Amino acid sequence: MSNYHIKHLEEYYQVYRKSIREPENFWEEVAEEHFMWRKKWDKVLSWDFSKPEVKWFEGAELNITENCIDRHLTTRGNKTAILFEPNSPDEPAEHITYNDLYKRVNKFANVLKAQGIKKGDRVCIYLPMIPELAISVLACARIGAIHSVVFAGFSSSALATRINDSDCKMVITSDGSYRGAKSIDLKGIVDDALEDCPGVNSVLVAKRINSDIAMKEGRDFWLQPLLDEASGECQAEIMKAEDPLFILYTSGSTGKPKGMVHTTAGYMVYTAYTFKNVFQYREEDIYWCTADVGWITGHSYIVYGPLANGATSVMFEGVPSYPDFGRFWEIVEKHKVTQFYTAPTAIRALAKEGVGYLDKFDLSSVKVLGTVGEPINEEAWHWYDDNVGKKKAPIVDTWWQTETGGIMITPIPFVTPTKPTYATLPFIGIQPALMDENGQEIKGNQVDGRLCIKFPWPSMARTIWGNHQRYKDTYFSAYDNKYFTGDGALRDEVGYYRITGRVDDVIIVSGHNLGTAPIEDAINEHPAVSESAIVGFPHDIKGNALYGYVTLKEFGETRDHNNLRKEINQLITEQIGPIAKLDKIQFTAGLPKTRSGKIMRRILRKIASKDISNLGDTSTLLNPEVVQDIIDHAK
Ligand code: WT7
């Protein structure tokens, strides 16, 4: 027996030990017993972190959609697979059963084929949180096309960069999207992006807001008529275990976004297994993750993980504040949600509005609460525990990354005793290590260091699309023979982990991963700007907000350039998206630099956080005098 479902702490330790001592036997049993294979593997694992190269279940053949849909049809055909809750509470929810999903995915897959999409082709999906998003993802997987979902809050230029980086042939979008009281012209954004994307031959457009949009003859097609004509049967393409399943972009601390490549078999096994255990999922549950499918959380824990377990996964189109701050709780009551998985930033925003919105609704169906995306502060943790879980629903603080594909450090509810702000223990098969500045592993407890992973796990990203060297440099070069996460962490006296935050130039704002370099590049495009540096500072709701130090070509008398502030944020919105806008902009005469010309962000970070008591040694700076000037005029 593979211990697919862990039920108590002793069992966790026992299974964990086995997964470390005999990883190949352990994962082979899980894979063997719980999935549908067209052909079994020849070798469970081969790996070499120095190349780096990792292969799981080599030789195996499968299609992930047969695991997420087909195999459930005999036992769960009429069960709801995707429960779509629209933006407006006045629009009825849609229950898409496994039978419906089968038909809709197969039809969509046939449409893709008719448009000339073949195995291995890249398809960009730029859709709001409507059923077509999950369906198009699965339709790509059905025919072996590699999906690249781009979050529909990214700007046209960010979209174009991502489309071109992976040479997508097609874009799937909609006529628009609803977000609270607003509607957004998504097709217009796609049209702008495609001015710079010569490789895109066709655009499929789903109807959502019935807006009057321009359709380019020969390139743009309304989706519905094509689906109406397509057959509801499409044979699943047989994929190799290590064939790419999708690309998902994540910000890097420098340069352009990184297209993380996830492959088929290992990703499926790990997301399904973590879903089952981290949410203690049971057949009758109604599971809701509030993330967007545009992020890894949505890929792994709205679509693939839940569906591989035959679960009902709620997909919510809207926002927590519309029509008011009770919307989440209304949905929990309406659908009797049993597992609720959200981000600390949402919890803080809701907590600020008070418990009045919660008290109106019956939340007694909730068994497990989850958080993800950034460290959760103690106050938010307790608010969640007291008011949403009523102290009866354990909180799983799940640490992981786009790169890891699945949850890595987390409590298992009803199994691992929780501790506020701690992600607690490594999940089965995960071997964390804390490293010191000299590259040595720090053993023992009550220590802190940089978080690495020592051994491969099935859902790790295999490369960066088109740039394997960058994959090696970013993740496997800081420490010998280890995957470096970019996060700092501490390990307490019992071995629980607490993630302390990024140790590189990535800033997490409202749970969104933002690299400083692309934002600085956007600002520097302004003709008046000579240089800029972005740092994070603590923010009550967003966790971190962005503070920009900007030097101008002509500094002049005044430091209040309000128009310029607006223009800078406008540029950022155009280049990246509104999520990367700066909360504070300070115009400065210069930026503190080392003698080699490197900006000393450490000092800027401290000033932005109003923590100037201990700025450290500034004597090595090329221009120490600017520091006082920056402090004097800090925002
Ligand atoms: C970074 C990865 C994994 C899905 C969402 C984010 C931070 C994530 C936690 C947590 C503290 C967390 C880390 C990580 N992070 N979860 N539970 N506690 N920090 O994916 O956009 O790839 O971001 O998010 O800093 O490295 P991502």
Image: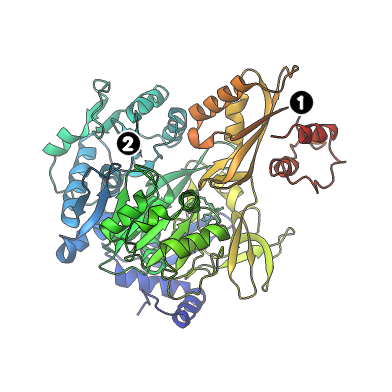
Q: Few, some or many C-alpha atoms within 10 Å of disc 1 (few <14, some 14-19, many ≥20)?
A: some
Task: Name the residue nearer the viewer: 533 or 457.
Answer: 533
Identify whether 583 is placed above or below 488.
Answer: above
Please name the residue shown 34% across and 33% down the image.
Answer: 169
| Quarter of image, res 509 | top right
Give coordinates of residue 186: x percent, y percent: 35, 30
Q: CA distance from mark 2 to mark 1?
A: 43 Å
> Which of the pair 192/211 is nearer the observer?
211
Task: Report the side of 307 relative to 106 (left or right).
Answer: right
Image position, residue 211 (x, y; %):
26, 26
The label nearer to you, 2 versus 1, is 2
The residue carrying mark 1 is 589
Left or right of residue 441, residue 152 in this image: left
Q: Position of residue 71 (x, y in %)?
A: 21, 62
Q: Which mark is residue 178?
A: 2
Q: Residues within 10 Å of mark 2 (few under 14, many from 20)?
A: many
